[in-house]
Amino acid sequence: MSIFRKIEESQTLLINNQSKNLESLQKKIFKFGFGQSPFLPPVQVMEALKANVHRKEYSSVQGDPELRQLIADFHFQVNGLKVAAGNVMIAPGSKILIYSILLSFKEADVFIPAPAWVSYAPQAKLAGHNIIPIETSFAKRWRVTPESMEHAYAKKEHEVSIMILNYPGNPDGLTYTKAEVMQIAKKARELNILVISDEIYGLLTHNQEHHSFANFYPEKTITTTGLSKWCGAGGWRLGVALLYEGIEDEFKKALIGIASETYSCAATPIQMAAKVAYGNVEKAQEFAKRQCHILEEVGNYCYTELVQSDIKLYPPEGGFYLFPDFSNYVERLGKLGINTSNELCNKILSETGVALLPGSAFGMEENHLTVRLSYVDFEDPLQKKDFNLERDCPKIIEGIQALKNWLALL
Ligand code: PLP
């Protein structure tokens, strides 16, 4: 028995290292594994960061009060959310906020859709909780439904229920309609589930129609978001949690306690730059919209090409991911000894240079041949006058064609 916790390096970070290793061996790699925004933050936001390097002091644990107010105003205007500045928490990334929320409970059942973002389950496990997957399927567009919630809820073991929802979704690139959000909210209320609504890709909904969960279940939803995706600033580490009005004192105290005993606060210069990012709603929306036009075009190109190769797939609706399902190739791949999504990704990487992440990293059964494809292997085209897929995304085109050619030979 090992004396250490069994926790592996996040698969998304791992694939990046593997790709880098192969690249150092002069192999051409199409980096469709790592989901990092290709866009630079807006110039004025970068200038604000430069101008604030001298801000070396710690901020309050919850974050700079003026920034919290700006964030509250921002999400009121953008999403219609009514959150008091006192219920805004700022941290070095939303990832640590999700973990802090989970850690605030002694024991809980954590309902996690499959597929869902790689880190939810390891975080719930580290926090000592019981993980209950919510099953989805290609036919149901990988969506959680009131029925699948009921089904998972029947396996409940603890008093506290937490569900993590994420849309637009990583790894599926899909979102929920207003009607779907309302149905899920209704069921969550009925079952008294605390919902963590991870809306980090909300502003990158391609048609700008993002419906925040907390609008329909305000009494028990915590929304998480931040600068990592829409502002292209993942490495800056600025995440946000919007707590609900009337949050239990003990819960909020636990959250702030965990924050103060671990990360202390988000970096102050980054918070100052975030004031500029959040301070002008129109500019932010305009910036997000420009990215969406490009992401939609690139994502649709990948989608259109891959469905021609008999891959099961939906057109992208937000963020920068696709979740291709290779079920139609099960037999052909099986003959080559490829029976798991991990084996599939390894084979594709070694034979085509296309780096993908296996569906199993997102909670899918090992033998379910799904992968996550992030279509962001291109340089920021926003610096140019216009966007041209062939000119600006050669690696996307080459990588997708390499994948198609590989499939054609199976
Ligand atoms: N949630 C999802 C679905 C993500 O894809 C990511 C980043 O990849 C995060 C949360 C973490 O974001 P942050 O950089 O705010 O920690």
Image (tube, rainbow, N blue to C red):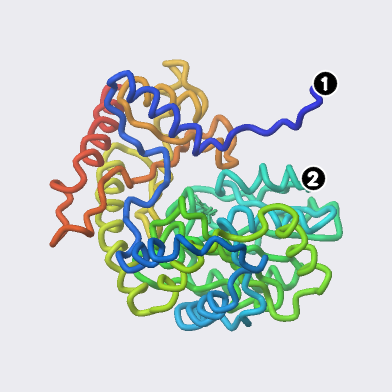
Q: Quadrant of residue 346?
A: top left
Q: Does mark 2 have its CB less than 8 Å from ligand 1?
A: no
Q: In this view, does 379 lie above or below 176?
A: above
Where is mark 2, residue-wise? 128
In the picture, the quarter occupied by the C terminus is top left
Residue 144 appearing in the image = no
Badge 2 marks a residue whose secondary structure is loop
Q: Against 374, is 59 above or below?
A: below
**Lateral position of residue 17 relative to residue 60, left or right:** left
Q: Which residue appears at 74% of the width and 72% of the height?
A: 190
Of 219 and 78, the residue lying toward us: 78
Which is more toward the observer, 350 or 41?
41
Q: What element carries label 1?
A: loop
Say whether residue 409 is left or right of residue 103. left
Q: Which of the pair 99/309 is nearer the observer? A: 99
Relative to 236, say whether 193 is above or below: below
Q: Indicate the quadrant where residue 42 lies.
A: bottom left
Per the rendering, the mark at residue 1 is 1
The answer, for residue 22, to whether it is visible in the render is yes
Residue 12 percent across, percent down from the top left? 50, 39
Which residue appears at 27% of the width and 66% of the height? 290
Marker disc for residue 247:
none
Q: Where is residue 199 in the image (x, y as percent from the top left)?
A: 52, 64
Question: Of the residues shown, which amino acid type is indicated by label 1?
Answer: Met
Q: Distance between the residues labelled 1 and 2?
A: 18 Å
Query: Sequence-wise, which precedes: disc 1 or disc 2?
Result: 1
